[in-house]
Image: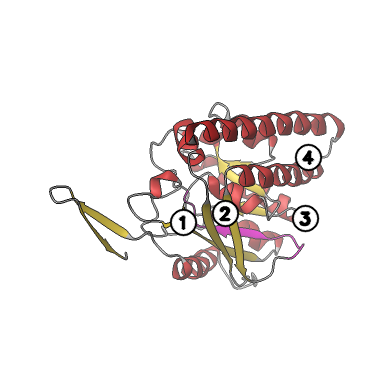
Amino acid sequence: MRPIFAIVKITSVLFFIVVFLMLSGGLGLMISSRWKLTKYRSYLISFFLFFCRFILGIKTQFKGESLDASSHLYVSNHLSYLDILVLSSQIPSSYVTSVEIKETPFLGAIVRAAGCLFVERRDKSNLENEISELTEALANGLNVTIFPEATSTNGDQVLRFRRPLYNAAIKSKKNVVPLCINYQSIDKKPIDTLNRDHVFWYGSMSFLPHLWSVSLHRKIDVDVTVLDAIMPTPKITAQHLSEISHQKVSSTYKAPRLVTQNHSHGIFKEEFI
């Protein structure tokens, strides 16, 4: 029966995406102000991703500090495209993603319609303009979310946070709010190194086969910890912001349990990493 439910889930998600793309396109025809349009699109995608998260059986619990309506630069560890469903359904935001994603069929159409901001990780020559764009978005009252590891990972550790985009918070005088995403379980089984690829999306994994894998599961539990905000001061640097936020996130993050299998005896060995 699971394949049938998976087909129903994916069909429903695709339906919501098509409706979202149509409404987002309509907003583009009615609103000429770039940042006003981007803000409305961030709320629109947040609304639709809430339903997509529900359809896919992703249950999210937010812990830690309270969220407020102020404009912030949110920074988070990055494990999967599912991170955006998890975060955006609770925090309407303009996400910063790579030009590669913008150029990817299907995903590219979604991120453009969602009002994402783009950076070219392969070429740093336009970095100052990209920082200026993020600064302008924050100054216009938008939430901006970045994944400063600059890639999704297999969850063994939180990679170092790259510092350049933190300059947008300094220039706009907006707080940096670190977020820590911990995927807890799949179908009530704790996340480990054998089952993590059912939800983590990294490396050369293909999108649609992975979405199919996600849809085969009934329930995915995720915790998001909202950590203490970091207020930029005249003396603080982007390097300091990246190091402080990385320390906060990495100390809260829990890596999947290491599970090894002895194929000759069919024995599993578990330990924490």
Is residue 182 visible to us here? yes
Q: Is residue 161 above or below residue 154?
A: below
Are the two marked residues, 2 and 1, in contact with CB atoms closer than 8 angstroms? no
Foreground residue among 77 and 262: 262
Q: Which residue has dot 2 on it? A: 165
Quadrant for the C terminus in the image: bottom left
- Frontmost of labels 2 and 1 is 1
Foreground residue among 140 and 71: 71
Are the two marked residues, 4 and 1, in contact with CB atoms closer than 8 angstroms? no
Q: Is residue 101 magenta?
A: no
Q: Quadrant of residue 224?
A: bottom right
| Prevailing secondary structure of the magenta residues | loop
Q: Which residue has dot 1 on it? A: 188
Crowd rating for badge 4 (residues with CA inside 10 Å; few <14, some 14–19, many 20+): few
Query: What residue lies at 44% left-to-right and 47% top-to-bottom?
Result: 200
Helix, strand or loop at mark 4 = helix
Q: Amino acid at mark 2?
A: Leu
The residues tagged by marks 4 and 2 sit, at their Cα atoms, a distance apart of 21 Å
Crowd rating for badge 3 (residues with CA inside 10 Å; few <14, some 14–19, many 20+): some
The tag earlier along the polypeptide, 3 or 2, is: 3
The residues tagged by marks 2 and 1 sit, at their Cα atoms, a distance apart of 37 Å
Helix, strand or loop at mark 3 = loop
195 vs 71, left or right, is left
The tag earlier along the polypeptide, 1 or 3, is: 3
Q: Amino acid at mark 3?
A: Gly
Q: Provide the residue span drawn in magenta.
A: 68-79
Is residue 128 visible to us here? no
Coloring basis for residues: secondary structure
Q: Which residue has dot 3 on it? A: 141
Name the disc covering residue 34, or none: 4
